[in-house]
Image (tube, rainbow, N blue to C red):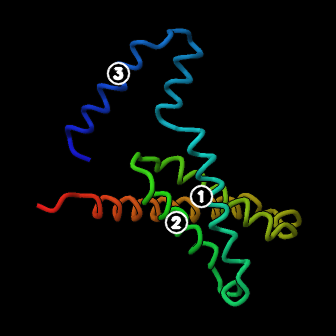
Amino acid sequence: MSTDELLREREETASRSDSQPTSRRDRLVSKFTGVFSPRYFLLALVALSVGLFTPSLLPIISALPGIGLVGLFGAAFALGGFRSERHYLETGVAGATAVAVSLLTQYMTIALVGSNVMEFATVGFGVGMVVAVLGYYFGRDLRDGVTRDIE
């Protein structure tokens, strides 16, 4: 994104904020949605969950360890390739949530019997966030390279 586009986006945001109501709740909601889009988070959560679980449905490759993370990376890559806006935070949190829930459901007995529930969730959360953000970054990078004018 060029500097002109960033400045234009900043001015549009400022002009929108001037015309908005000034109640405390409205200001809080506008600040929150300016940083984090709940609608895009839900879209990313569904897409990344499908990407995480789809490889386990294929008979031969489902036995490979970590194949769900490859699907997660692919889904995040597709999200990054199709969207022009930046949504790294939403994609990262959605990927982290999907992997953490997947780990906890796969290893439910270990999580319930053992005392390492937080370690499982933390590792899943961290790995999911890194894989999702990397996939999203490379998808956006490919989109930028394909759509950029050749000089």
Total label count? 3
- The location of residue 140, given as percent across then percent down, is 38, 58
Within-10-Å neighbours for mark 1: few <14, some 14–19, many 20+ = many
Name the residue at 25% across, 39% down: 5
Left or right: 134 as drawn, with respect to 123:
left
Q: Is residue 54 above or below residue 19?
A: below
Would residue 52 appear left or right of 24 to someone viewing this image? right
Q: CA distance from mark 3 to mark 2?
A: 33 Å
- Residue 148 lies, in percent from the top left, at 23, 58
Secondary structure found at label 3: helix
Alpha-carbon span between mark 1 and mark 3: 31 Å
The residue that mark 2 highlights is 131
Hey, what amino acid is under mark 2?
A: Val
Residue annotated with mark 3: 14
Question: Which residue sits at x=56%, y=12%?
Answer: 24
Q: Are marks 1 and 2 in contact (CB under 8 Å)?
A: yes
9 relative to 130, above or below: above
Disc 1: which residue: 95
- Horizontally, residue 56 falls left or right of residue 33, namely right
Callout 1 secondary element: helix
Please determine whether, in this image, residue 67 is positioned above or below residue 33. Answer: below
Which mark is in front, 1 or 3? 3
